[in-house]
Amino acid sequence: MPYWLIKSEPEAWSWDQQVKAGAKGTAWTGVRNHTAKLNLMKMKKGDRAFFYHSNVGKEIVGIAEVVKEHYPDPSAKAGEPWVVVDFKAVEPLKAPVTLDAIKGDVKLKDMALLKQSRLSVQPVTADEWKIVSKMGGK
DNA sequence: GCCAACGTTGGC
DNA sequence: GCCAACGTTGGC
């Protein structure tokens, strides 16, 4: 099963808001980058993603799950190609995994989070998923 | 089709 | 607040 990492500035959309959105989940709107869009389109229902707080916090705070596969982004202008998927919060990490901690682990040096820091929807390998989950207290 | 200018993201 | 990375735009 593929794994992902989704980024949000907590001032715009935080993990707490995602939790409050409940089991039904919410649309992950606002992706305006083609690489990120392609990743959204690859996601299948049930895929899991790390929820990362960019800018403020700079840490992975929880695990989200795809509840609805991609469909046109309601926040896009007519004719634009952007898509969204619906995510729900699954569970928080017991201990958030900070960017510093990720940088400090040589096994995570190839993570897209470090290599393509501006990409807001990224793939995560199974190994990376396992390591970060463990660091997060799972 | 190239590339300079410009805007945005996100870490520091 | 600065700046590196990088995507987009527009002149040629």
Image (cartoon, coloured by chain):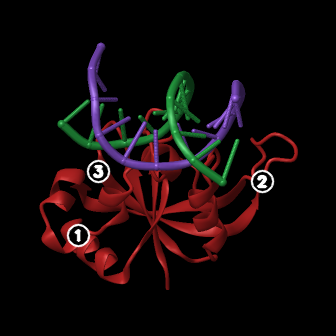
Chain colours: A red, B green, C purple
Please name the residue shown 63% across and 46% down the image.
A32
Q: Is residue A122 above or below residue B3?
A: below
From this view, report whether residue A98 is shown above or below residue A138. above
Near mark 2 (Cα within 10 A), the count class, few <14, some 14-19 or many ≥20, is: few
Residue type at tag 2: Pro
* Residue A133 appears anywhere in the view: yes
The chain ID associated with circle 1 is A
Q: Position of residue A24 (x, y in %)?
A: 65, 60
> What residue is pinned by disc 1?
A108
Choose between A64 and A98: the one closer to the eye: A98
- Taking the image as drawn, is residue A138 in sight? no
In the image, which disc is placed on residue A16?
A: none
Per the image, label 2 sits on a secondary structure element best described as loop
Give residue A81's mark. 2
Q: Nearer the viewer, residue A75 or A96?
A: A75
Which label was assigned to residue A59? 3
Amino acid type, label 1: Leu
- What residue lies at 36% left-to-right and 82% top-to-bottom? A126
| Residue at mark 3: chain | A
Give the side of residue A7 with respect to residue B1, left or right: left
Residue under mark 2: which chain is it in? A
Q: Are marks 3 and 1 in contact (CB under 8 Å)?
A: no
Q: Which amino acid, mark 3?
A: Glu
Name the residue rendered at 49%, 80% in the picture.
Answer: A2
Q: Earlier in the sequence, mark 3 or mark 1?
A: 3
